[in-house]
Image (cartoon, rainbow, N blue to C red):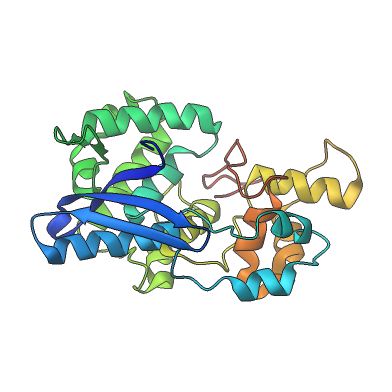
Amino acid sequence: MRGSVLHRLVPGLEREPVHVRVAQTAPDAVLIGARAHTRASARAAIARMRFALAVDDDLRPFHVRFRDDALIGGKLRTKRAYRPFRQPDPFVALAWTIVEQKIRFSEAAEIIRRIVYRLGRRDPATGLWYPPDAAAVAAATSPRLQSFGLGPPRARALSLAAREVAAGRIDLCPDGDHEAAWRRLRAIPGIGSWTVEMTAIAGQGRYDQVPAGDVGLLKLVGRMYTGSPHARADEGEVRALFAPYGEWAGLASLVAMSPTGPARAGTRWSGRRPHSVDA
């Protein structure tokens, strides 16, 4: 943020880093501009940023239907203009989700900064950093990824996922075949339901996907069912609680996780381990 304007480097055509600026000029008006080598690339970058900000999604049915809901109604009434933030690049959503597995968000943020600074690019004109794409991450060895603070399992998972995306075997585009991409992701050791569901929400715009393995949700539902502040539900109980929200289940779960609206829950769990919360 620079003053009241959001600045970001967003992929344009041919992965060109495009400088996009966003300003909210009124409660219901957003101005988005971009500077690129071609108008087509600028338009592509603006479209990606509009997706990230969800400005074209009609969320009125969600707010109207659930404004009096016992679980999330109060939060929706205090955040009437709420829209979830997503990533302009779905691979970045996947990569950062893998980084966040099993650690606190503050620790994950430090690792993400190291990845961006060492594998990404800095635009000298704006001073902004451009996150590495799938090809750049795929070119890094697992030991190099570990040097950023990732444990060996997560480093391998990130490396394998990057290779699959870079090779075109996994298509994470919001308008692609989501289910096919999820099946391929789940075939990668260390990637399970939570990673896929968070990628679906943050990278593909899927409001129906509930990240049921999120510790924040497990604690929330556990407290609701037992009254104990130390209780944790299981994934099945989390999914059952949000099933009535239907196509809005994932969005409802994000709202429910924080008393002030959607927020990162802190610790993440993932991995293919028996008797543990699977991502």
Relative to 68, say whether 135 is above or below.
above
List the single residue furthest toward the right: 227
Left or right of 259 in this view: 223: right
Which quadrant of the view contains residue 180? bottom left
List the single residue furthest toward the left: 37
Left or right of 40 in this view: 134: right
Residue 77's spot in the image, x, y percent?
Answer: 73, 59
Which quadrant of the view contains residue 56? bottom left
Q: Nearer the viewer, residue 193 or 80?
A: 80
Relative to 156, say whether 76 is above or below.
below
Q: Is residue 70 visible?
A: yes
Q: How many marks?
A: 0
Please give the name of the residue rendered at 62% of the width and 54% of the height, measured from the top-left corner: 254
Left or right of 159 in this view: 257: right
Q: Nearer the viewer, residue 261 or 5?
A: 5
Residue 262's spot in the image, x, y percent?
Answer: 61, 49
Please give the name of the residue rendered at 50% of the width and 63% of the height, measured from the top-left corner: 28
Residue 86's spot in the image, x, y percent?
Answer: 44, 55
Please give the name of the residue rendered at 52% of the width and 73% of the height, measured from the top-left corner: 58
Which quadrant of the view contains residue 62? bottom right
Q: Is residue 212 visible?
A: no
For the N terminus, the quadrant is: top left
Residue 151's spot in the image, x, y percent?
Answer: 42, 29
Left or right of 22 in this view: 274: right
